Amino acid sequence: MPGRTQRKFTDSLGKQPLADFKVGVDNAIFSVDTSQNRLLVLLVMRHQEPFLNYWGLPGTLVRQGESLEDAAYRILAEKIKVKNLYLEQLYTFGGPNRDPRESVDSFGVRYLSVSYFALVRFEEAELIADGVSGIAWYPVKDLPQLAFDHSDILAYGHRRLKNKLEYSPVAFEVLPELFTLSDLYQLYATVLGDNFADYSNFRARLLKLGFLSDTKVKVSRGAGRPATLYRFDAEAFAPFKDKPLVFI
Amino acid sequence: MPGRTQRKFTDSLGKQPLADFKVGVDNAIFSVDTSQNRLLVLLVMRHQEPFLNYWGLPGTLVRQGESLEDAAYRILAEKIKVKNLYLEQLYTFGGPNRDPRESVDSFGVRYLSVSYFALVRFEEAELIADGVSGIAWYPVKDLPQLAFDHSDILAYGHRRLKNKLEYSPVAFEVLPELFTLSDLYQLYATVLGDNFADYSNFRARLLKLGFLSDTKVKVSRGAGRPATLYRFDAEAFAPFKDKPLVFI
């Protein structure tokens, strides 16, 4: 556990007055284009200052009477249509000087960002262009310069996604209902990077865990032998839920 | 992955104005009294409204120019002296109506809480009484009614601690340098609840993982056979770091 020696707080801030804040939510929405093996993140082009014409994460400021989560769902609903979605809180970024609007010449209040993480099925998600701001899936490997500290938020979200793949069955939310073991392996390799594991170990381990059910249906792709299609068996997985299961 | 069907946001909030916030940090500081096998959390008694004379998590409001993390370290340094400490962000609670000071008759701004998680060594931690507010380690199993939504924050922190025990070597931060396998088992049972695992499986599994080194020293406690003292070998653990290692 990384330690930190306890500092003396001689209270260099004196009795500074309390900071005033506006609170934003920013969503790191990921999907995987399984046909091209690319991990994607949803970006929108800002059409106002600060960072006019920069790409950034879809976000909004929290309104009176609105919960953080509702604000996250609101901005998501404005940008993307999906049948089912899942959001979870990621991290809160709130240091001084993270937003130019903090300056006394501007609004003179701090801007804190509570970030949320989402993963959606690429084929199902329908982007909503609002006629003003641009919107696009960008490959995580090839991003433009982002507004604010959004590249930090995105990096944090990417780590969360990697962790989730390791201990949760999140991959099966992204794959089609029937998939080959090679599809599953490819998805892991796309998110975790090449050489994350040896294919035959990965295959043997997952089959042994017992929650991939063999549909007895085979599919031919390209020149190789026909491959078996599997289905994720949520019931067989249930006893492992919330356990730090080793997928890799 | 628990889904949520996408709601229609007919914008029932209309174009509500943005909410104004003060931002607090609240620390869920845990320790384990290994001599009595109790999981403890640090509480302070509030000496001001709201929730006057209630126990709550040590917290503070973020000042101008201060980062969230620095605010968390500041309040920690005011309450407890420890040689080394480790804090990580836990979760942000920011819904409307979580703080009575939000009322228009009071300060009329929302209060958001960024919570932090810490684990300290019980024997090393020295509580600081400031002469005004009370301070005490409380057993997590036997808590008083807490101020605000602090029991939610605490429950969230307890889950984080359980998860960390399952996949990280955090236990060795809490145990003395030399410990018996029974000490280690007892610590897990204290945090995770009885019957979390069978002792002999636990013992066999951990020895096989290879990062507990046998000091060849034996210790007698009570009537049983002398037990071997072990030391955690951080170097042997290094390759497993950040892997979802199954400790239990």
Image: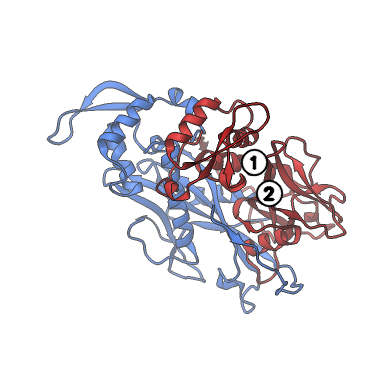
Chain colours: A blue, B red
Alpha carbon of mark 2 to alpha carbon of mark 1: how far? 9 Å
Using residue A194 as the reference point, say whether residue A51 is left or right of it: right
Q: Which residue is mark 2?
A: B28
B50 vs B177, nearest the viewer? B177
Q: Position of residue A44 (x, y in %)?
A: 44, 59
Report x, y in % for residue B161. Answer: 60, 42
Three-letter residue code for mark 2? Ala
Q: Chain of mark 1?
A: B
Residue lying at the far bottom in this picture: please name it.
Answer: A105
Across and down, in percent, residue A7 comes to: 65, 66
How many other residues sit within 10 Å of disc 2, few (<14), some (14-19) or many (≥20)? Answer: many
Q: Nearer the viewer, residue A220 or B229?
A: B229
Q: Quickly name the residue at label 1.
A: B158
Q: For the residue marked with disc 1, what is the amino acid?
A: His
Q: Chain of mark 2?
A: B
Judged from this view, the residue extending furthest toward the left is A223
Are discs 2 and 1 less than 8 Å apart at CB? yes
Q: Residues within 10 Å of mark 1 (few under 14, many from 20)?
A: many
Looking at the rendering, which quadrant does residue A169 occupy? top left
One can see residue A178 in this view? no
B173 in relation to A14, above or below: above
Q: Residue A198's mark? A: none
